[in-house]
Image (spheres, rainbow, N blue to C red):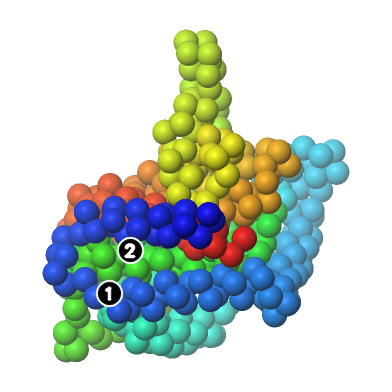
Amino acid sequence: MTYLIGILGLLVVFGLAYLASNNRKRIKYKPIAIMVVIQLVLSALLLNTKFGFVIINGIASVFGKLLEFANEGVGFVFGGMANKGEAPFFLNVLLPIVFISVLIGILQHFKILPFIMKWIGLVLSKINGMGKLESYNAVASAIVGQSEVFITVKKQLGKLPPNRLYTLCASAMSTISMSIVGAYMTMIDPKYVVTAIVINLFGGFIIASIINPYTVPDDEDILVVQEEKQTFFEMLGEYIMDGFKVAVIVGAMLIGFVALMAAIDGLFEMIFGLSFQHILGYVFSPIAFIMGIPASEVITAGGIMATKLVTNEFVAMMSLSDIASTLSPKTVGIVSVFLVSFANFSSIGIIAGAVKSLHEKQGNTVARFGLRLLYGATLVSVLSAIIVSFIL
């Protein structure tokens, strides 16, 4: 029965993507089938084998050690507050982003990350049937973040047609930034974070290949990566401030969204006797069902999924961690994978703003297809959750 629901889920996701396709005749089915198989193999490898266990434990240990180092700096500045147990989320989850941001900056400065991103992107372009720029951008988005990635390709932004620009933005919204992976791992199981990062990469290509199919001519498929000339200490200062800005912005958004959700929940309970999240759970329950979540838990899971879409993944992860003990391990795993992406309404503004800051006309183009962008990125999250449901 699990496999039948999973197959039904795949058909629904592909059907919804097909309905939104802007050129159904140009869809390349062979690369899509290959990438679905790759997603299944990688999910099984990471979640169901000893090798995957070693890999994930190794990655989790690295991030655990990085968080320990980060806490040295946090403790030095905010030691008194930390000792009294005040503001633990901001101190223990968000502020370590600053240190991880610095490490990313160092790897960028010494051209280690650009080398990795470029060559992984080139390999992926052979699999997904898309351009080198699109493949590089997907890898880079998963490392440097959904807004920062456009800086690395800003020389080419103004030359891109809307269809290629859509794919770049879809990749940015479907992935996450390495700078906040450690934060995610404090709220949900690291194995689901790692698995989601890997299969979302291919999921983004799959959905974009259906919604937005095209072929890049060889003479236009040129990858030019922008590298800013900075001294080592200029770079350190920039990435420290960037990391701190991310931590503060995420903290501010959490304050606003959590408070707003509490107010809306209170209002709905007064009027309807049900919380807003509970009502959204009914709306999203069919999607939760095709993702392989047991029928008894689809409303609860649907509410968490809707929370992520309406607010952001941090708010949803906090909701999941609060009730994880009341849900089955399978539901926790599927929902966890669904939550690991930037697919929410606020990301439309973030991505459009990032592109507009580099090229105003292209930023306006992104804003116009914002809802279609979110639609595709959400399908990527649903697809990844369905793939994982076959394995769990």
Circles 1 and 2: CB atoms closer than 8 Å: no
Q: Earlier in the sequence, mark 1 or mark 2?
A: 1
391 displayed left or right of 322: left
Question: Hey, which quadrant is residue 214 in on the image?
Answer: bottom left
Give 50 or 306, whichever is nearer the viewer.
50
- Residue 8, image x, y percentages: 40, 55
Residue projecting furthest to the front = 1
Alpha-carbon distance for marks 1 and 2?
Answer: 11 Å
Kindly report which numbered mark, 1 or 2, lies closer to the viewer in this rendering: 1
Give 181 or 252, whichever is nearer the viewer.
181
Q: Which amino acid is tagged 2?
A: Ile
Res. 87 in view: yes
Q: How many marks?
A: 2
287 displayed left or right of 76: left
Residues packed near mark 2 inside 10 Å, few (<14), some (14 to 19) or many (20 plus): many
Q: Is residue 297 above or below residue 362?
A: above
Q: Which amino acid is tagged 1?
A: Tyr
138 displayed left or right of 209: right
Residue at 71% over, 48% down: 91
Q: Which mark is residue 286?
A: none
Residue at 36% over, 83% down: 127
* Residue topped by disc 1: 29
- Residue 45, image x, y percentages: 61, 76
Give 149 or 359, whichever is nearer the viewer.
149
Question: Hey, which quadrant is residue 24 in on the image?
Answer: bottom left
Residue at 30% over, 79% down: 30
- Residue 14, image x, y percentages: 32, 59
- Residue 181, image x, y percentages: 60, 61
Question: Hey, which quadrant is residue 56 in on the image?
Answer: bottom right
Res. 144 in view: no
Q: Which mark is residue 207?
A: 2
